[in-house]
Every structure is written in C-alpha cells, then in structure tokens.
Image: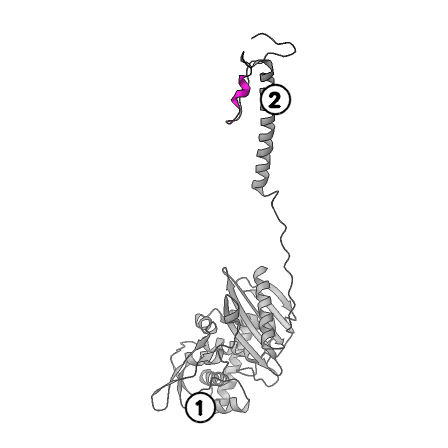
C-alpha cells in the first residue's frame, strides 16, 4: 500500500481485547479508504480508554471503596431504675453500667443464690421429697410474702420446690429448701447454716458488695447486692442445666403427694418474669420487689448465638423494670 500524504505507514494493529471491533482494522481496504482507517484507530483508542475506566471502577466497587457506609452509632439507653448492669455472658465484658456497684436491697432476686446453693449440693437428688411444715406456711402469712401455696403435710420433690421458688417466687418453697439443705439440729440452725452457704458462694465468686441475711430476700437490714454482683451470680447459676430449664419455663403444674398418699394437682405456677412472653430470645432469670428494693429484674436473652445478661435494681414499677431490661438487652446485642 502506498504512503498516504501526512500519514505514516500503518503496518499492523494488534487487538488487545476479545470484544474489539474488528471493523476498525479493515479501514485499510481499498473500498473503505483513508478516512475509515483513521476512524477505526480513534475508535480503538476510545474503546481502550473506556475499558480501562470500566475495569478501574469495577475494582473500586469490588473493594467496597465506593460503597462503604459509616457504622451507625449505638445510643446509650436511659433507664428508670436506680441501678443497672449488662454484660456479654460469654466473655464477661461489661456493656452498660449505671451505679453498677452501689449496694441495694435485692428483693426476691436473692432466690437466684438460693437455687444456686441447692443445685450445687453434692449427690443432689431432685426427686427427693420434703414434707411441708406449718412453719413454712405461717412464715409467708406473717410476712405477707409471695408464695407457691404449698399445703402443710404434702410431700413435695426438690425439683418441684425449685420451680415453686423461681416461678411464683414462693417464699414458702425457699424456707423448705433452706431447712432441707442447711445443717443443724434445729430449724433455726439449719436456716442459718444455709444462709452461710449463700454467703460462702458469694465469696467464692469474689463478690465484695454482696451479703445475705435471708434465704428469700425478706431481709433484716443486711441483705444486699449490686447490679454487677447479681449479674455475676446469675451468670454462674446459668451454668447449671437444671437452673436454665427452670428459669426459662413460663408455667409449671406440680403433682404432690398428700398425707394419705393420694396425688394433689397444684394450681399452676406462672413465671413472674414477663420478658419470657414479650422479648424474643429471653431465657431467664428472676424478678424481685419490695418496699425497700423497689422493682428489680435479673434478665438474660440469647440471639444469634450471643447471650446478654444483666440486672436492674430499684425501678419504679413492673412495666418500667421490664422496659428498662428490654432497652438494655437491645443495647447489649447492638454492642
């Protein structure tokens, strides 16, 4: 081919892309002439530039450089309760604190330790029976305390007593368990010994702001704990499969043995922990209330393999303690 005026000889153009417009390289044909050749070369250059831009943009999109969004901040919740604490149950990492180490009356959340001590007994037989004494009944009447409505003379299993302790928060069940698992020749001595075991268990957990002077939370002025300590007690108790099974149960109907040997079907015990029915993933653990304690709740829930556990002490009502707990659980899962 002759050299065209003002144009160097184009010896060969090698395509670098599989989908290159081959017509651009046919511009040297006799039919197309000089203008087709130039147009083909320019088109090739534009194609290369466009392809380079597309490849670069794709790389940026692949690495997320153009699509990454900033992480949303998690707002620390405000709660009504005077004290609160939340932690990751697996790691023990603190997720929320509000007066977490301030000593307060704990009400019936004390019964978490009562159950923990019973379940820690060596050679424990949950099917062993306890005969209900008049003293247990008189005690709840005298103190206007929450009860499982156990019948004097009935033989009740330890397992049933634990359900009666944790679901309706029966102080009569707590008394029966303390009498059963304390050591001593008198009821008073056995109860005192059992409370000593509760304090020993707190010491073993290295809790410096917890002390028990009762088996059920009806204290004598020195029954106290903190949101952080109660959460740790509950976390330890939750290691027991029996404890976990009890505190996640919404209702339970016990069949006890009467004095004559017949079977008595007790009125169904309903768990006082409203979160079991109102917050998805809730697995426990215990409510508490009283004139000094206010409204308390130790709570735990599991979502997507993560368990969050915590405590609110001295809230102002049942709805408020549950609202506080829900806020803290949701916050804990978001952290």
Q: Is residue 25 above or below residue 77?
A: above
Q: Position of residue 13 (x, y in %)?
A: 55, 18
Q: Which residue is mark 2?
A: 42
Q: Are marks 1 and 2 in contact (CB under 8 Å)?
A: no
Find the distance from the CA under tag 1 to the CA under tag 2.
103 Å
Q: Residues within 10 Å of mark 1 (few under 14, many from 20)?
A: some
- How are the residues colored? one colour
Residue at the left extreme? 261
Q: Residues within 10 Å of mark 2 (few under 14, many from 20)?
A: few
Q: Which residue is mark 1?
A: 133
Callout 2 secondary element: helix
Does 246 appear in magenta? Answer: no
Position of the C terminus, as image quadrant, is: bottom right
Residue at x 60% of width, y 16% of height: 35
Q: Is residue 321 above or below residue 11?
A: below
Q: Position of residue 151 (x, y in %)?
A: 43, 89
Q: Is residue 208 visible?
A: no
Indicate left or right for 111 with 131 as reference: right
Q: Is residue 58 visible?
A: yes
Indicate left or right for 111 with 65 as reference: left
Q: Is residue 314 above or below residue 9?
A: below
- Residue 100 falls in which quadrant of the image? bottom right
Position of the N terminus, as image quadrant, is: top right
Residues drawn in magenta = 19-27
Residue at x 58% of width, y 17% of height: 36
Callout 1 secondary element: loop
Residue at the front extreme? 31
Q: Position of residue 39 (x, y in %)?
A: 60, 20
Q: Position of residue 38 (x, y in %)?
A: 60, 18
- Compare marks 1 and 2 and give the one earlier in the sequence: 2
Does 24 appear in magenta? Answer: yes
């Amino acid at each position: 081919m002759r050299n065209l005026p003002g144009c160097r000889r184009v010896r060969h153009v090698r395509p670098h892309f599989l989908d290159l417009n081959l017509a651009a390289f046919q511009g040297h044909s006799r039919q197309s002439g000089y203008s087709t050749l130039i147009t083909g070369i320019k088109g090739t250059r534009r194609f290369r530039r466009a392809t380079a831009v597309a490849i670069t943009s794709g790389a940026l999109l692949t690495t997320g450089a153009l699509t990454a969004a900033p992480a949303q901040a998690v707002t620390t919740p405000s709660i009504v309760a005077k004290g609160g604490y939340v932690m990751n149950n697996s790691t023990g990492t603190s997720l929320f604190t509000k007066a977490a180490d301030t000593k307060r009356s704990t009400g019936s959340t004390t019964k978490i330790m009562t159950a923990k001590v019973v379940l820690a007994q060596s050679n424990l037989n949950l099917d062993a029976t306890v005969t209900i004494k008049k003293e247990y009944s008189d005690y709840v009447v005298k103190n206007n305390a929450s009860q499982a409505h156990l019948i004097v003379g009935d033989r009740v299993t330890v397992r049933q007593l634990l359900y009666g302790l944790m679901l309706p928060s029966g102080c009569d069940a707590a008394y029966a368990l303390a009498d059963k698992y304390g050591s001593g020749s008198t009821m008073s001595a056995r109860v005192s010994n059992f409370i000593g075991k509760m304090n020993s268990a707190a010491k073993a957990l290295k809790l410096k702001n917890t002390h028990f002077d009762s088996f059920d939370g009806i204290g004598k002025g020195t029954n106290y704990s903190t949101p952080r300590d109660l959460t740790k007690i509950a976390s330890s108790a939750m290691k027991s499969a029996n404890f976990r099974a009890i505190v996640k149960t919404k209702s339970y109907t016990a069949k006890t043995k009467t004095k004559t040997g017949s079977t008595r079907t007790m009125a169904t015990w309903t768990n006082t922990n409203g979160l079991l029915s109102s917050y998805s993933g809730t697995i426990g653990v215990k409510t508490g209330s009283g004139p000094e304690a206010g409204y308390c709740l130790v709570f735990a829930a599991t979502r997507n393999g993560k368990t969050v556990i915590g405590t609110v002490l001295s809230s102002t009502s049942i709805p408020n303690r549950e609202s506080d707990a829900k806020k803290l659980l949701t916050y804990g899962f978001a952290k």
